Image (cartoon, helix red, strand yellow):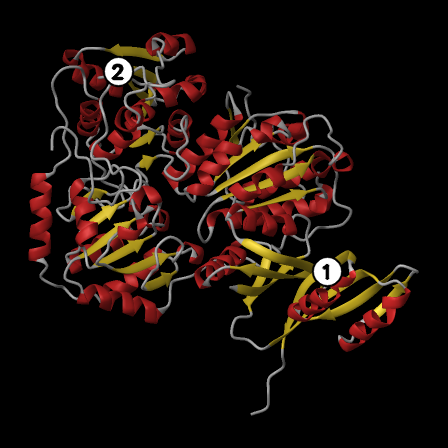
Amino acid sequence: MTERTDQAREPAPRRYADMTGAEIFNQMLLEEGVDLMFGFPGGAVIPIFDVLYDSPIRFVLTRHEQGACHMADGYARSTGKTGVVIATSGPGATNLVTGLATANMDSVPLVAFTGQVRSNLIGNDAFQEADMTGITRPITKHNCLVTRVEDLGRTVKEAFYIARTGRPGPVVVDIAVDATVNRPAREPSMEPDLPGYKPRGGGHDRQIRAAAEAINAAERPVLYVGGGVVIAGASDELRALAAKGRIPVTTTLLGLGAFDETDPLALKMLGMHGTAYANYAVQACDCLVAVGARFDDRVTGRLETFAPHAKIIHIDIDPASISKNVVVDIPVVGDAKTILAGMLEFIEPRDRSAWLGRIDEWKRTYPLKYDPDGDIKPQEVVELLGTLTKHDAFVATGVGQHQMWAAQFYGWRRPRQIITSGGLGTMGFGCPAAIGAQFGNPGATVIDIDGDGSFGMTMVEVITAVQHQLPVKFVVLDNDYLGMVRQWQEMFYHKRYSSVSHPCPDLAAVARGFGAEGMRIQDRAELADGLNEALKHDGPIVVDVRVAPEENVYPMVATGKSLDEMDLGKLA
Amino acid sequence: MKHVIMAMVQNKSGVLAHVAGMFAARGFNIDSLVVGRTEDPDVSRMTIVAVGDDRVLEQIRKQLEKIVTVVKVRDFQDTSYVERDLMLLRVHAPGEKRSEVVELVNMFRGRVVDVSRKDMMVELSGPEDKLEAFIDLVRPYGIGELARTGVIVMKRGKQAS
């Protein structure tokens, strides 16, 4: 790596009119507090990289732009700060698309800068030209093209403001190369010009009161909590509200950690692979309080029969989320933290022992479980990782069976702990996202619980972890299958296993080839010691755990079924 | 059900694509979408005629408001407003039919803006249903070509009470 000489840097020129676009760009990032960014250089962004050479901003060069985007995402989810990624025009930019769509679906604050060809060439099919604003418009919160250096600084400022406020999301700023080379003709204005952007505040008092009164009137309320509570930093308010009203709490995949699962009121995750007791509770409740969640089809199952007896309260910062899938009785639009705090004073302590007793009965009858005999079970690997890390690690995942087992069995205790692609379901997210989380949390334990299918898609980024000596633990639940698709083919397609056999290479050997530590575990006798040793290893390590190949995720609510029509598996 | 929605948008490139793309991506059906300049050079006015029930209308309004470059959205449900659609229509009207067609044009307070031996071009403006009625009446003569701008609307002033 190049030595940086921060002290020797000349003071930045005072007037923007004296600076090149690239210098203005760097200056605006510094003003936004950016100290780390991910990306990959190329022709259209060379002027920016020339300025970054002297910048105090740390730059992480990845192996692929998609990896850079997921790293910025993992950094953002684990820290609450805005992730920053940069790529060149054309293929560099289009390689960000999956990462942007991932961040958009899960409301992650991200700013992506893409190079664009010289402004007089735009539209001419120039070398490495792609219409990035056109491509990313439906998968970003906002995007724009900058062709004039006079607009660059203000646009960068606006991008950060839009990305982190309201319902957060990714913003793409596509910058024509001449806008980074030129100097402004006159001193440009840095004042944001966003007449159409008004993020919501704290919610309407009358609605807050109405929501609290509906809860007070309910015999069997349930709190259904999503990623919005994590984003709003509203876990304390949630805990206080649940405790005061004696209200059980279920979370979505992205809401995991917003409510401590060791709390007796915790129902863990709901939905397609949620706990039986969470799903039964939602179907039986008479008041469902959705907070920062959006009634995703993986959560509701068959919409017509979802929470059939419940009055529905929906607290969300995005008005467009309200009554989109489910007609809501009491909408409260605004920031979850303020709204939950506001509701707390109106919530009356109530004896709900009959309701909680019924739930406890379900918990005893239908716990999450698996058959611990035979091959190593993926669930026990996750459970062990939970115990060994005292349920306090950051855990990234890919997408598929392993993701659901991680969600079910890790034991989530604090917000921002899980880093997973919920909305888009992006395989390959885990490895780079874990690296991003480790960059944002240098002293913390960060694990990527991955599947061999997902890990294979982006494992090249292990090299990035090696380069920066990040002690990320990549634990791969390796079953030689694309397991979730295989499970569906087993259950719904008469075991016609079409293109799911996925022979996995010796990942320990691959890891060593990359310069990381590698470990392969095939016997249960080696499992606990092996994981323990891996967690203690001070550097990147890939643990290839060979698990039972045809294990299924249960419970499962098949598509089109109601939440209470679960397949509980063989152990029910 | 038909709804008229107005969106004031920033006069920037890509805004029309964004709005049109949102309608397509979310499966909303639109009858017409008109964009034009306003009294403010920084702001354009979009008038959208969309089809759907009240829930669809509410989603359309919210999704429009969510677009950063959309400054203001108003739906005209339960509002008294003036509606105009402008049409140019070429109708087959040889010598013997010409006066009949001109009579119809006059009844609808339209104007004949071009005449040839075989046909004439008519300009007509008004609410959509008036235009539809005129089209129905001249169809038997043979419509050669038809172009409409789509609907624009404006709320009526407050009535003294």
Q: Classify mark 2: helix, strand or loop.
A: strand
Q: Position of residue A340 (x, y in %)?
A: 29, 59
Task: Kindly indicate whether the residue at mark 2 contacts the one at mark 1 (C-beta within 8 angstroms).
Answer: no
Q: Give the position of the C terminus of chain B as an image quadrant.
A: bottom right
Query: A544 or A325, which is in the foreground?
Result: A325
Query: A36 or A405, which is in the foreground?
Result: A405
Task: Tell me: A45 left or right of A266.
Answer: right
Please name the amino acid that badge 2 sits on.
Answer: Val
Query: A567 or A201, which is in the foreground?
Result: A567
Please name the amino acid that badge 1 sits on.
Answer: Arg
Tally the numbered discs: 2
User: Looking at the image, which residue is at 45% across and 64% down?
Assistant: B54
Q: Is residue B116 visible?
A: yes
User: Looking at the image, which residue is at 55% across and 45% down?
Assistant: A31
Q: Is residue A437 above or below residue A148?
A: above
Q: Chain of mark 1?
A: B
| View extreme (bottom): residue | B161
Disc 2: which residue: A545
Q: Classify mark 1: helix, strand or loop.
A: strand
Disc 1: which residue: B148
